[in-house]
Amino acid sequence: MAVYPPDHHLLRDLQTQAEWVTDDECIFTAPITDHVRSSTGALALGPMFAVTDLALVSTAIGFADGDWCGTLDLSIRSGRPIIDGPLVVSGQVLRVGGTLITTKAEILDGDRLAGTAIATSRRMPRNPEFNEAPVDVKVVGQVQHWGIAGSGFNAPVNEQLGLTQIAPGAIELAKTPYVTNSFGTINGGTTGILLCAGAEAALANEFIATDIEVRYVGQAAEGPVRTISEIVRVEDDHAVVDVTAVDISRERRPIATAGVTLILPS
């Protein structure tokens, strides 16, 4: 039986756990390990994005009446750096429509506010080719562990994903089962990590990504997927980069686009 995610997958290695603490609030937590930190020692924006995407789409699924959900857009605004952990993402639903579900989250370093996020998810039928597991049932107080025995990164997250720099701002990712989502394209959290890496590479990795707004516009076929980056602004203390991820196997058809704000570490 096809089950998502498979045993060896990014979402397993993030080692998150989830709990519905009320009928309306789902809390995800994840440890801060050396392999998800940036060069500053704080949690990197890419892994934060991946956990937040998982948390908010999972929150949306709790209101989808048995349907699956896919992220359409997700924005993260960072405050203080996340140093100690655990990373906590507290998700709630703002609006449930016929097709679209809007969610928001507070992002915390343990019990201290470190940022906020907002996302839109689209309801869709479950794809049994990739996930034949029973429909998720929301149970308040029941903890769900995404990691399993042996889960966890054994290299920095960008290295474990296999990100390869082709040119400044151009980062490439192969489509593998490790990054594929429940309906056969590249996982949204992985795409966020890729977009952050592209923005940082556009600035010779001298700046660190802190805020991001992502819009998903397509699905990867065979891949690989590659970033195309455009520097919008560079100041003494921050920069803004527009990044688009394109599917090389489909004549560079866009699959996601993002605006990324970066800061120069002090």
Image (tube, rainbow, N blue to C red):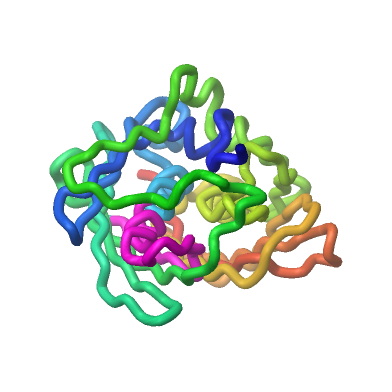
Percent coordinates x, y for residue 95 in the rendering: 29, 77
From the viewer's side, name the closer residue of 235 and 30.
Answer: 30
Instruction: Write the residue at 41% across / 71% down.
Output: 120
75 sits to left or right of 157? left
From the viewer's side, name the closer residue of 114 and 27.
Answer: 27
Most distant residue in the bottom direction = 98
In magenta stretch: residue 246: no
**Which quadrant of the rendered structure holds the N terminus?**
top right
Q: Is residue 248 above or below residue 254?
A: above
The quarter of the picture where residue 212 lies is bottom left
Q: Is residue 206 above or below residue 162?
A: below
Q: Is residue 40 above or below residue 134?
A: above
Which contiguous range is marked in magenta? 55-78
Percent coordinates x, y for residue 117 in the rendering: 32, 62
Q: Does the rendering let one see residue 11?
A: yes
248 sits to left or right of 3? right
**Which quadrant of the rendered structure holds the C terminus?**
top left
Q: Does the rendering let one see residue 264?
A: no
Figure label count: 0
Instruction: Write the residue at 57% across / 35% down.
Output: 6
